[in-house]
Image (tube, rainbow, N blue to C red):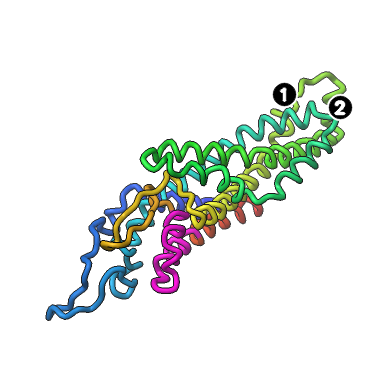
Amino acid sequence: MNAKISAGTLLILLLLFFSFFPDLIVSSKNAPSLLLDEEGEFIAKTPYSPAEYPPLGTNVSGEPLLHSILIGAKYTIVFVSIVCLLRFVIALVLAIYYAFYVHKFKNIWKRAIEIAYIIPPVLVVFFLLAPLLGLFQEESFHFMLLLMVILISIGIPPLALLIGDEIKNELHKDFIKIAQLQGVSNFYIFKKHVWRIIKPRIGIFFIQNNIQLLLLLIHLGILGIFIGGDRAIKVSEEKSILVPISNEWGGLIGSSYQEFLLHPWIVLAPLFSFMVLIIFLKVILAGMKGH
């Protein structure tokens, strides 16, 4: 396996491992509401900055940000991976049918899909889910499934078109045409010839789709759509805030972006986590393209 692919995959697997066992790195206990020196003098109160509570500081309720990020990593990574995998499985089936059997009106289908996706997917998801947020406050798993279904559904048409065009390009090659004239079945042609050629490109498309979906989760988080829904926590007698139940990274950004000017580390920590994960995926992508 290419060294870049191996390195990127290993780093993501390590992140997943520590996400399932975060206590190996950081305690899950909340920080005290007040930070005092050895003489009992006041130093600071929550939220603590990274300098006051290393390595990443805390949020407004005193939860260590590193622990929240590690907990949320598995939900972010696994959720994105499952959505992309199901997108590709369904899109591949539709792409095969499109490439082999759709000859009439194919340009109309293509144009219709292109026009439909002028609307940003983040707005489509938001307008579909925003009215339902109140119904799922206590049903985080059901909300996660609903979000997953919507994200899979909106991603299938352009993917099917992309993969279908890749298959169609291969069908125009001379040796494929000869096989078709000899009566070889479409399934055999795809399995023995086309799939072997397009498989590396499908891998590249898959990683690119993961990156796009991670960026979409950031936008959804800012709009208040969290994986698994949200829960309210009190930060004072008068004030409570909504935070993601799963601690997924988009939700960590979306639940605290109002704090950016006063406590920027609360937003920058999960945003930096997204950047690191995308860099890992970019390393894998570079390895695939080089290979």
Give, as a single range, the part of the protein colored magenta.
Answer: 249-274
Whether residue 95 sits left or right of residue 7 in the image: it is right
* Residue on which the image places disc 2: 178
Measured from the top left, where is residue 176 in percent x and y? 82, 30
Q: Is residue 237 above or below residue 53?
A: above
Question: Label 2: how many residues lie within 10 Å, few (<14), some (14-19) or many (20+)?
Answer: few
- Residue at the image point whose x is 75% and y is 27% from the top: 189
Q: Amino acid at mark 1?
A: Phe
* Residue on which the image places disc 1: 187
Nearer-N-terminus badge (1/2): 2
Measured from the top left, where is residue 223 in percent x and y? 51, 55
Spatial CA distance of label 1 from label 2 is 15 Å
- Report the number of numbered marks: 2
Residue 123 part of the magenta segment: no
Q: Is residue 14 above or below residue 34?
A: above
Q: Quadrant of residue 172?
A: top right
Question: Label 1: how many residues lie within 10 Å, few (<14), some (14-19) or many (20+)?
Answer: few
Assign a secondary structure to mark 1: helix
Quick check: can you spot residue 3?
Answer: no
Whether residue 52 sits left or right of residue 196 in the image: it is left
Measured from the top left, where is residue 264 in percent x and y? 42, 71
- Residue at the image point whose x is 12% and y is 81% from the top: 39
Quick check: can you spot residue 116?
Answer: yes
Measured from the top left, where is residue 254 in percent x and y? 46, 58
Q: Amino acid at mark 2?
A: Ile
Mark sitting on residue 65: none
Mark closer to the observer (1, 2): 1
- Contact check, label 1 and label 2, Cβ < 8 Å: no
Q: Observer-nearest residue: 103 or 36?
A: 36
Residue 273 part of the magenta segment: yes
